[in-house]
Image (tube, rainbow, N blue to C red):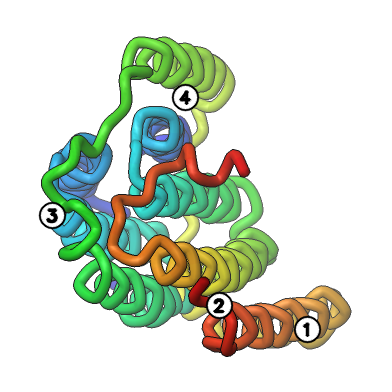
Amino acid sequence: MTLAHYLCLGAVLFGLGIFGALTRRNVLGILMSVELMFNAANINLVAFNRFLYPDRPWGHAFSLFVMAIAAAEAVVGLSILLAIYRNAKGRPVRVGVLNG
Amino acid sequence: MATVTHMPLLSAIVFTILSAALLALVLVVVRSSNIFHSAVALTGALAIVAAVFAFLGADFVAASQLLIYVGGVMVIMLFVIILFQQSAGSNAPQTNEQWLTGFFAAGTVIGVLVCAFWGAYSKITTAHEPGPTTAALGRLLLGDLAVPFEVVSLVLLAALIGAAAFGTERPGDHR
């Protein structure tokens, strides 16, 4: 396996994440697509680390940082979503309601 | 010790199986009309990404991926879906009319990135034996990367406070 195989896997994952973020109507679906894009970036970081700098795990450390930021983003996003649902009182919530 | 990286055919087979399963699950995530199915497929996809990490020799990152994403983020997401999605019109259409825009945007990104990566990195292989990375990673995180490491803990604290602030139900919220 060459480095390009893993990078292309990450690129396809990233592109599908963009597709999901653009076409999803539900805020939760958009959050899930953003998680996919984070994971694509992580695959690329770890793959570069493995193939180009196998002795220094900087790529691993950065992917851990990305995971921590993604977890924080998911928690804050989901709590905002809960607040929106609570204010909507059972009406369907779409991205359009975020326009203000 | 002969690892899977020293057997090219077996390595290619494992990579192909992991990629195919990952792409199938991701397609379910982005196209499923049921948000609950999307979340379950996303859980599987994140677990397979952890398998890809383990296959790349990143043992600590793979374990963190399983703990943080599959064990933490996805459980919260499934909680939110189960609690609130049933009453919030789960039979409404889940995708909008921008699929053509999304298709071209995603196709452009995938095409450009795959061409660039394939042209630049398709000759690079590695003979490096994967080993335990946890000790080196710990020294790095508390040595060269100590400041970002502490800043991330501040970010997590801010996320905790933010989640508590948004989650608290104050009198007067219901108008």
A71 in relation to B33, above or below = below
* Amino acid type assigned to the residue bearing label 2 in the image: Asp
Q: Quadrant of residue B43?
A: bottom left
- The residue furthest front is B175
Tag 3 residue: B37
Q: Earlier in the sequence, mark 4 or mark 3?
A: 3
> Tag 1 or tag 3, which sits nearer the N-term?
3
Amino acid type, label 1:
Leu
Q: Nearer the viewer, mark 2 or mark 3?
A: 2
Q: Secondary structure at mark 2?
A: loop
Q: Position of residue B16 (x, y in %)?
A: 18, 39
* Disc 4 packing (10 Å; few <14; some 14–19; many ≥20): some
Q: Quadrant of residue A53?
A: bottom right
Give the residue pinned by disc 1.
B154
Q: Earlier in the sequence, mark 1 or mark 4?
A: 4
Q: Look at 64% across and 84% down and name the residue there.
A: B165
Task: State how far apart marks 4 and 3 are (Cα).
Answer: 36 Å
Read off the chain for label 3: B
Q: Earlier in the sequence, mark 4 or mark 2?
A: 4
Q: Secondary structure at mark 1?
A: helix
Q: Nearer the N terminus, badge 1 or badge 2?
A: 1
Q: Position of residue A5 (x, y in %)?
A: 38, 33
Please tell me the numbered disc located at residue B122: 4
Q: Nearer the viewer, mark 1 or mark 4?
A: 1
Q: Quadrant of the N terminus of chain B?
A: bottom left
Q: Are marks 1 and 2 in contact (CB under 8 Å)?
A: no
Residue ID for mark 2: B173
> Which secondary structure lies at badge 4?
loop
The chain containing the residue under callout 4 comes to B
